[in-house]
Amino acid sequence: MATSPPPSQDKPCPAIPMGVDETIQHSDWPALTQAEIKAVLASHGHAHHRQPRILETSIRPYSAAALVTLPHGEELFIKRHDGRLRTAGAQQKEHDFIHHLHSQGLPVIQPLKTPQGQSFISLPSQQGAPQIYELFPGLKGRDTYRHDVTWGQSWHNQAQAYAAGALLGRLHRASATWRTPPQPRSQEALLLSGMAPLEGADGANRFLAAMAQRGLPEQRALLAGDLPGLLHHFHQRLRQAPSQEVFLWGHGDWHGVNLTWRQDDADKIEEVFDFGMSDATSAAFDLAVALERSAIAWLNPGGPAPFSQALLDAFLAGYASTGFSAALKRCASWLPLCHVPFALSEDDYYRRLLQDGASADIALEGYLVGHMQWFLAEEGQRFLSTLQQSAERHAAAARHCPLTPSQKR
Ligand SMILES: Nc1ncnc2c1ncn2[C@@H]1O[C@H](COP(=O)(O)OP(=O)(O)O)[C@@H](O)[C@H]1O
Ligand SMILES: [Mg+2]
């Protein structure tokens, strides 16, 4: 990992919103500064006298990013992570996974390497923990879902839902040969989305015990409320779920916002990016995460159309077209639980790191518990049974082509 002198004190670039809600006016992280951008570009061999032109700087929640143009027109995307959120080791694992998928023919955007062969750099910062910087080539495809909200909007049409399902299936097939332990769990490693905390027959009990042990007052309050009952209910259903778990690294955030589409065919995927939540989970868990983020209109789950059966069917048909069925049969059982570890880690992120109690409360009450309550109520039950039936139908029709045997942990 290359280290350079700390960027000189200069002002963050003015925020030019990028991505989801462009009306948001605040950012959790300071925008990248000209000095940081120059330092990152220089470490990648782009030492220019002139300032790079900044097209956009991001105000997205978990990191800071900027899209810049070099003097000869090439666009590059820089992403900065606070070192308390991502260690160098975790970043390296994520990149190794991206390179593996690329070697298997997946259309992933690969991080650019420095002349010394490093795919990210680390710079000291005034906050204490070094900051981690990734550099990517600009997107080739159309960023069609750029203004959409994860958890808010589904696929734009059935052809895109099918393509997204099919590519996730291909990703799982390619990832089944990637045998690397999960991202490390530690007090420092916030923002993780893994299934390990809930795995095994005693998963619900272990999870609740771990929450109690942390002793955070807001989390303890949930333990005295609906949470234990909900967790036990859905965990029991998971234990009875059909088919074997196929352990593999998943993308962890499969949604249109992390895909681009071909310039010459709006319904074909050009490239996949944003592997920040990738981790060792399972095919069913990762499929459930994809559905949790894209299949339900969480901004209005009590509205007249909380989900689209046609889009759900198209997505599952795409996934089934890649030829294995184990994940399809189990994904409905993971769905009410797959957000649980991430929601808890979001609570940590907002409460401990950002001291933003209001967002942390939303993560615990609205997300962690609220989503499970929805799945238990009438609409959620209807969704889960529609999903189970549809998934089993597609699994039965799938050309049988099993993945490699389950990986042992
Ligand atoms: N290589 C890139 N070139 C140009 N824009 C990009 C690139 N990668 C991401 N973006 C844009 O920035 C947004 C945020 O990037 P992403 O890596 O998905 O981070 P986040 O963790 O905030 O979702 C994307 O949704 C996309 O609109
Ligand atoms: Mg993203």
Image (tube, rainbow, N blue to C red):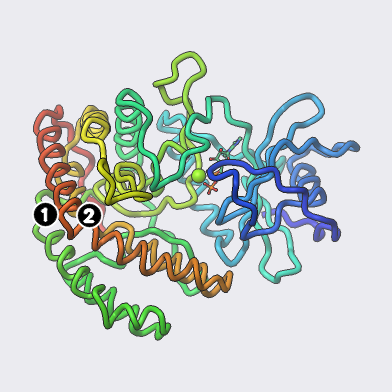
Observer-nearest of 81 and 3: 81
The answer for how far apart the CA atoms under marks 2 and 1 are is 9 Å
Residue 273 in percent (x, y) is at 50, 39
Q: Amino acid at mark 1?
A: Ala
Residue 30 in percent (x, y) is at 70, 58
Q: Which residue is mark 2?
A: 334
Residue 347 visible? The answer is yes
Occupied quadrant, residue 341: bottom left
Occupied quadrant, residue 178: top left
> Residue sitting at 68 percent across and 57 percent down?
122
Vertical relation: 223 (above or below) 384: below
Vertical relation: 211 (above or below) 125: below
Q: Looking at the image, which residue sits at the far top?
A: 264
Vertical relation: 242 (above or below) 270: below
Q: Amino acid at mark 2?
A: Trp
> Residue sitting at 52 percent across and 37 percent down?
147
Are circles 2 and 1 on residues that touch, CB within 8 Å?
yes
